[in-house]
Image (cartoon, rainbow, N blue to C red):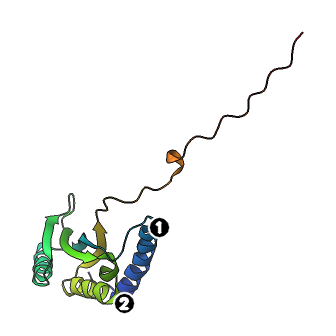
Amino acid sequence: MKVDVNTEINNHLQRNKALKDSLCQKGVELRESLSIELHFWAFSKQTAVMLAKALYDEGLMVLVLTLVDGEESRWTVEAGIKDTIEHLTSLPVVKRFVELAAEFDSIYDGWGTQLDNLPPQSSPSQQPPPPPPPTTTPPNSN
């Protein structure tokens, strides 16, 4: 499957900006080193294996290499890296992963990470209930 590498890079940069903005609003430090998973799609066993080997050669740990359930020609390749979100979402890194995937007729689908110990966020369900309305004495019926 051929992809337009420049379009893919621009799409990732736009999505990453939105993700980083959202994470910053939640108090995530983008320069903190985290375990991050990278997600790729390959369209044959051969290209999935070759992509996984290339990721390994780049210093990443291959976490998943499997055929997608119910599909004959779509493979998931996931790799792990210890990095910062700020660095991982930079143009040179995004470009490298998009181009590396394209070398094997595959797609770089993006990244994910487990966020532990986020600062508490105020949400409507966490806010205290409003105070009860003032009570009034009913008029005297006498």
Q: Residues within 10 Å of mark 2 (few under 14, many from 20)?
A: few
Q: Quadrant of residue 58?
A: bottom left
Given residues 72 and 41, the one toward you in this image is 41
* Badge nearest the viewer, 2 or 1: 1
Mark 1 lies on a secondary structure that is helix
Residue 21 pos. (x, y %): 46, 73
Residue drawn at x 41%, y 68% as measured from the top left:
23
According to the picture, the residue beneath numbered tag 1 turns out to be: 25
Mark 2 lies on a secondary structure that is helix
Residue drawn at x 27%, y 78% as measured from the top left:
107
Query: Up-down: is 67 above or below 91?
Result: above
The answer to which of marks 2 and 1 sits earlier in the sequence is 2
Q: If the image is split into quadrants, where does the N terminus sit?
A: bottom left
Query: Up-down: is 38 above or below 67?
Result: below
Query: Up-down: is 62 above or below 92?
Result: above
Given residues 120 and 53, the one toward you in this image is 120
Report the side of 121 relative to 136 (left or right).
Answer: left
Residue 15 pos. (x, y %): 41, 76
Residue drawn at x 20%, y 68% as measured from the top left:
76
Residue 62 pos. (x, y %): 13, 72
Residue type highlighted by circle 1: Gln
Determine which of the numbered discs, if any, sits on residue 6 in the image: 2
Q: CA distance from mark 2 to mark 1?
A: 29 Å
